[in-house]
Image: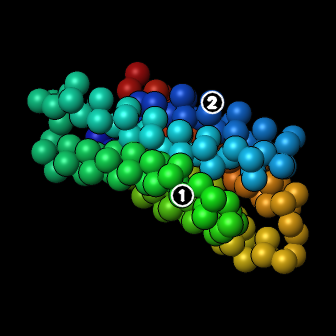
Amino acid sequence: MKSLLVEKFAKYAVFRAALLAIMGIVTFLLPEFLLSGMVYVIAGYMILNGALGITDYFLRKNENEKNASFVNIAVACLLIVFGVLSVVYYRYVVGILPVFLGGLMMLESMFYFVIALFTSAKIKPLLISLAVFIIIGGITSNIFTFGFGGIRTLSHIFGTLLLLSCAYELFVYIVHRKTVR
C-alpha cells in the first residue's frame, strides 16, 4: 500500500510541478491575477487532477489493489466536484479568497505530509519539513491577509507556497525515479 501511494503520486508529479511553477510565477508577477482568474486556474487544476485520477483508475483497474483504487476514484471525483463548485460560485470564492487559498494549501500539505511519511528515502525529513512549511503558509494566508497585507501580501504568500509545492512534487518524483531504477 505504501509504495502504491507514492507511485500514484509520483506518476504525474512532473506535470503538476510544471503547473504549480507557472501558477507561482504568475502569482508573484501579477498580484491582481488572484482576483481576476486564479480561482478558474485552480479549479481547472483540480478538475484536471481528478480527470487524470479517473483515467488512471480505468486504465489500471485490474492491476491496483481494491482499497487503493476506491480511495483514488473517490478523491478524483471529489476534486472534480470541488473544482466545478469553485467555478459555479466564483463570486463567493473571490470574497473569501485568503481562506480559500489558505485552506487549499493546508489540505494539500496534509496530503504531502502523508506522502512524506510513506516515503522510505533519505530525503524524508526534507519532505516532512516542506509539508510543514506549506501548512504554516496556509495558516498564515488565512490569518495574516485579512486586514494586514492586502492582495500583494496574499500573492507573495500564495506564490511562495506554490513554488514550495512545485519543489516538493519534483523531490518526490526524483526520489521515486531513483527507487524504481
Q: Residue at x 70, y 53 (%)?
A: 161
Residue 47 occupies which quadrant of the picture?
top left
Disc nearer the start of the sequence (2/1): 2
Q: CA distance from mark 2 to mark 1?
A: 27 Å
Q: Is residue 32 above or below residue 137?
A: above
Q: Residue at x 63, y 30 (%)?
A: 18
Decide if residue 10 is on the left or right side of residue 59.
Answer: right
Q: Residues within 10 Å of mark 1 (few under 14, many from 20)?
A: few
Q: Is residue 148 above or below residue 115?
A: below
Q: Position of residue 20 (x, y in %)?
A: 64, 39
Q: Look at the image and tell me in which quarter the C terminus lies.
A: top left
Q: Is residue 139 visible?
A: yes
Looking at the picture, the colour scheme in use is rainbow
Name the residue nearer the viewer: 46 or 179.
46
Query: Badge 2 is on which residue?
Result: 18
Q: Position of residue 29 (x, y in %)?
A: 87, 41
Decide if residue 122 is on the left or right side of residue 52.
Answer: right
Q: Residue at x 50, y 52 (%)?
A: 88
Q: Is residue 61 above or below residue 98?
A: above
Q: Which mark is residue 89?
A: 1
Residue 12 occupies which quadrant of the picture?
top left
The three-letter code of the residue at mark 1 reads Tyr
Q: Is residue 102 visible?
A: no
**Between tags 2 and 1, which lies in front?**
1
Element on which disc 1 rests: loop
Furthest toward the top, the residue is 181
The three-letter code of the residue at mark 2 reads Ala
Name the residue nearer the viewer: 161 or 179.
161
Q: Position of residue 133 (x, y in %)?
A: 67, 62
Q: Residue at x 60, y 44 (%)?
A: 40
Decide if residue 6 is on the left or right side of residue 38.
Answer: left
Q: Which mark is residue 146?
A: none
